[in-house]
Image (cartoon, rainbow, N blue to C red):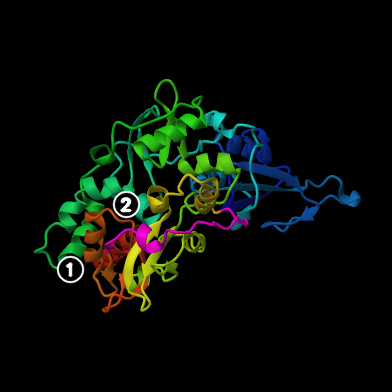
Amino acid sequence: MQMQGKAYRVIVYIGEDDHYRGKPLYMALLEMLRREGASGATATRCMAGFGAHSRMRTSSIIDLSAQLPIKVEWIDNLEEIERMLPVVRAMVDDGLITSEIVEVVQYAPGRHRDPLAQPVRAIMRSGVTTVAPSTPVADLVSLLVQRGYRSLPVVDADQRLLGIITDGDLMRRAGLLTRLGLQDQLTPEQLQDQVAALHTMPHRAEEIMTKPVVTVQPEDTVRQVAALMAKHMLKRLPVVDGAGRLVGLVSRVDVLRTVEYHQQTAEAEATAPKAGATVAELMNTEVPTVHPEATLEDIVRALESNYQRRVVVVDSEHHVLGILTDGDLLHRSRHAQDPGLLRRLRNLVTRQKELSVTLPYAGENAGQLMTEPVISIRVDTPLVDALRLTLRHQIKRMPVVDEDGRLLGLLGRNSLLNGLVNASAARVEG
């Protein structure tokens, strides 16, 4: 597994004489974290210190009998921290535990001459948050909408993979489409109540999950994984053993990392959705734009300037004309197979920070490559209407415009859903 970018560091301060089930606590913590698939942890013996009991622990020659302080540092991504931190807390009776955000510059097991020939087990993420078939919709909403998880494998008591759930499954099969789209005779207030009802709906994970699931095995090569993803147009695949038990998850970004070697990526992070109760509060106002005459180099530079991987094409008065993604370039540009362009687009996905050669291509511009017409919404659009539109057209980000059609921002579906759920919960509590 490779990791780069935003991560979390947990530090546990304990004493050298602390034990857990007959074993030094620091060793028990390290062994548990390793067994559970943590990215890495280190125990350090400190020179001196004191804690809640004000007992001085020191390595001074004057007090050789004193037991020294121990510091255990553990760095991982948010999902792994959330999964294992409760176990750490249960093991530490007397000590201090802190958590902070850190930037991982490099973490990788080493370079390979042919990275695509590696087995999947070398790059997969083994610690995967799963749900049971009986998990209620309320819990799925919390994980997929409010906490930003992208997929949830559904497993039985023996960890055999039964299905998988994404936010799209939640929208299509949990009854939200029927409630929100649907029923045009409902008032916005009634639609808000329907969103709030998600938390009391009788649906369970097994009723809305996608099945069967395209899977790979640990010994399959990364090259095979890439081919399957391209064939089925998937961004991530569960990894199962010979008995069908879930052992990991591999994403398209993981494949890209093996090629470019431990890159930072926005997709790999569980990005928290924005908070707010209106489109104006939930939209992102940092939107890269180009004019229709923009060259391929101009387009790629604009894509590189923002993590959203979208560029809105506007006229001289900022009216929205079209939208461009890296996928549009790959599908429509006659230079799509050029190594220079592919490298730039790969760096775009993996958030690689390096200087790339300028693309010398002429004869293509944004007006020819963009997707049009664009589904956009007014800034004063009610959230339920915005959600109805994004679900109907299967759009993850929509341009937000003023009354004259001028661009104001981009609204992401996850932020939109989170705003609706929070607004509904507030109305119910009020």
Q: Is residue 33 above or below residue 268?
A: above
Residue 275 visible in image: no
The answer to the question of whether label 1 and label 2 lie on touching residues, with beta carbons closer than 8 A, is no
Q: Is residue 111 above or below residue 272?
A: above
- Left or right of residue 30, residue 236 in this image: left
Which part of the image, by quadrant, shows the C terminus? bottom left
Task: Decide whether residue 186 is among the magenta residues.
Answer: no
Residue 375 rendering spot, x and y as whole percentages: 27, 63
Asked where in the image residue 109 lies, by quadrant, the reply is top right
In the picture of the structure, the residue carrying the numbered disc 1 is 189
Name the residue type under label 2: Val
Q: Nearer the viewer, residue 334 or 61?
A: 334
Residue 104 rendering spot, x and y as whole percentages: 62, 52
Which part of the image, by quadrant, shows the N terminus? top right
- Left or right of residue 93, residue 313 in this image: left
User: Which residue: 28% across, 33% down?
Assistant: 211
Task: Decide whether residue 362 is among the magenta residues.
Answer: yes
In the picture of the structure, the residue carrying the numbered disc 2 is 141
Mark 1 lies on a secondary structure that is helix
Q: Nearer the viewer, residue 362 or 51?
A: 362
Name the residue type under label 1: Glu
User: Which residue: 28% across, 37% down?
Assistant: 210
Residue 25 visible in image: yes
**What is the span of residues highlighted in magenta in the rendered image?**
352-375
User: Which residue: 21% across, 65% down?
Assistant: 385
